[in-house]
Image (cartoon, rainbow, N blue to C red):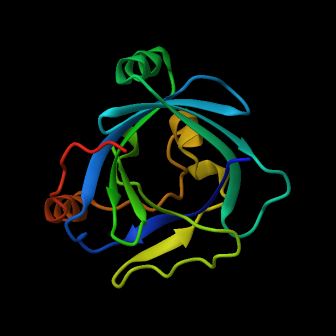
Amino acid sequence: MAVEIEWKFVVRRMTPLQPCKAFPIRQGYVNEGSPLVRARVKGATGFLTIKAPLDGISEGPSRRLEFEYRIPRDDAEQLIRLCSLRTEKTRYILPDGMEIDIFEGSHRGLVVAELEVDEGTHAPDAPDGWDWVDVSNDPRYTNRSLAEFGLPGDAPLIDEETLREVIVHSADRSPWSE
């Protein structure tokens, strides 16, 4: 069984990132309900992902079943075009494995930090100069919910000037596929 265990934080304040890998992500949601079926283009690679919740989890990191399969990029692009619910973001991979997603479009200003962990791992501390809130089990911050319902009314957003500063300092945007 493939289980994703992940801490997820909405970033309220951040400092510029050190140079790190960065790549665009476009994704669309193929179905309604559960399990979630998502088509994604991540860098130069296409993926089809199926996610389903595990029952009874309300504290700590989120826990979900996750099955991810590489598919031809063109197929992923075509599937995304068929989807009415989509999100776009740029993902930055920090040296410690933390993934920072800076959303685009109608979600601009939303910054989410995620870290996949092993069972029993405590929440990581925010980097120096950062402030974040744990949303690991807040369904409003799943990418699917953001695509369908938009930003929650109380979502903290990072201002444009800070985003520009963060993006300029993390300039390693080489095409990257897994």
How many marks the image carries: the answer is: 0
> Quarter-wise, where is residue 8 in the image?
bottom right
Identify which residue is drawn at 55% across, 50% down.
152
Frontmost residue, 5 versus 149:
5
The vertical placement of 162 against 122, above or below, is: above
Q: In this image, 3 relative to 113: left or right?
A: right
> Quarter-wise, where is residue 95 in the image?
bottom left
The vertical placement of 177 against 5, above or below, is: above
Q: Position of residue 97 (x, y in %)?
A: 42, 66
Q: In this image, 16 relative to 32: left or right?
A: left
Identify which residue is drawn at 69% across, 69% down.
119
Identify which residue is drawn at 42% across, 69% down.
12
Q: In this image, 171 relative to 78: left or right?
A: left
Q: Position of residue 104 (x, y in %)?
A: 33, 43
Frontmost residue, 113 versus 4:
4
> Quarter-wise, where is residue 21 in the image?
bottom left
Identify which residue is drawn at 54% across, 71% down.
133
The vertical placement of 104 against 93, above or below, is: above
* Quarter occupied by the C terminus: top left
Q: Position of residue 123 (x, y in %)?
A: 59, 77
